[in-house]
Image (cartoon, rainbow, N blue to C red):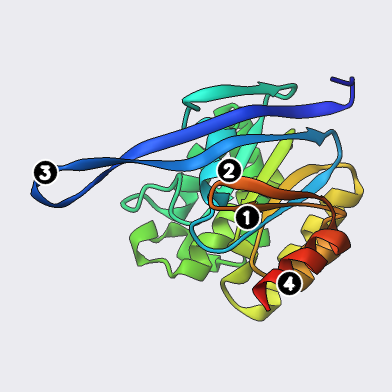
Amino acid sequence: MTANNLLIIDNVTLSYRTRLAFFRQKRFTALDSISFNVSKGETLGVIGKNGCGKSTLLKLLAGIYKPDKGSITQFCERISLLTLGVGFDAELSGRDNAIISAMLLGATKKQAMKLLEGIIEFSELGDFIYQPMKTYSTGMKARLGFSVAVTLKVDLLLVDEVLGVGDASFRQKAEQYLLKKINSQQSVIFVSHNESQVRRLCKRVVWLEKGRVKMDGATNEVFEQYNSKSA
């Protein structure tokens, strides 16, 4: 352990029950003996095929899930998970969801109200901000979630595929803003299937395969091995 550590994930295993026919259940291991560290100011990419455990890992780090085995040591207070379909109330307006999300990340209501104008402006949602979230497209939800996450000051930002949805102009704007945050030493764990995006944003990558760490290293080296296996 060093003073520069933000997260220490040590031999973490997470499993859950899945339903089978005739009321039978089976235990499925989503993450198996995972270990790696994240340093302060680091942007770590997480790659792997669908079902390898990437999104589960982020939810675990965000505190939504608890590990069955192992430990997660955090040297940070505010962690924001940016993923589609998590954290929004479909019946409430985008405006109300933005306020609630900011408060869940530690802002007081007064602070959240002060941040609201900037959130709305960055999201480019206009009058749609007053409409219920159930009327939002996937891209609109991603816009609002990203705008809340980057407007608030957090210790660790967990980004799960959200830069891959919505219109191209906002995706470019969001990536540029995220890069600006990274350059100012914002700590980020970034999940994406977009190799070029991961290469632009991350110097280090963890490759997950069937719930285990297949490789952890420099971005170019990991992708060289990952692509050779996928070919």
Q: Contact (CB < 8 A) between labels 4 and 3? A: no
Compared with 215, 140 (above or below) is below
Label whose residue precedes the other's in the sequence (4 or 3): 3
Compared with 224, 188 (above or below) is above
**Looking at numbered disc 2 in the image, what kind of residue is underneath it?**
Leu
Residue under label 3, please give it.
23
How far apart are the two marked residues, 3 and 2, measured between alpha carbons? 30 Å
| Residue 186, quarter of the rendered image | top right
- Residue positioned 75% across, 45% down in the render: 188
How far apart are the two marked residues, 4 and 2, measured between alpha carbons? 23 Å
Q: Pinpoint residue 22: horizontal percent, then vertical percent.
A: 8, 48
**Looking at numbered disc 4 in the image, what kind of residue is underneath it?**
Asn
How far apart are the two marked residues, 4 and 1, measured between alpha carbons? 29 Å
Q: Nearer the viewer, mark 1 or mark 3?
A: 3
Label whose residue precedes the other's in the sequence (3 or 2): 3
Label whose residue precedes the other's in the sequence (1 or 3): 3
Q: Nearer the viewer, mark 4 or mark 2?
A: 4
Residue under label 2, please give it.
58
Query: Which of 37 and 211 lies nearest the eye of the viewer?
Result: 211
Residue under label 1, please give it.
146
Residue 227 - label: 4
Q: Residues within 10 Å of mark 3 (few under 14, many from 20)?
A: few
Q: Quadrant of the C terminus?
A: bottom right
Label whose residue precedes the other's in the sequence (4 or 2): 2
User: Is residue 127 visible from the viewing direction of this image?
Assistant: no
How far apart are the two marked residues, 4 and 3, measured between alpha carbons? 40 Å
State the SS at label 2.
helix
Q: Pinpoint residue 25: horizontal percent, then vertical percent.
A: 21, 41
Residue 196 - label: none
Q: Nearer the viewer, mark 1 or mark 2?
A: 2
Q: Residues within 10 Å of mark 1 (few under 14, many from 20)?
A: many
State the SS at label 1.
helix
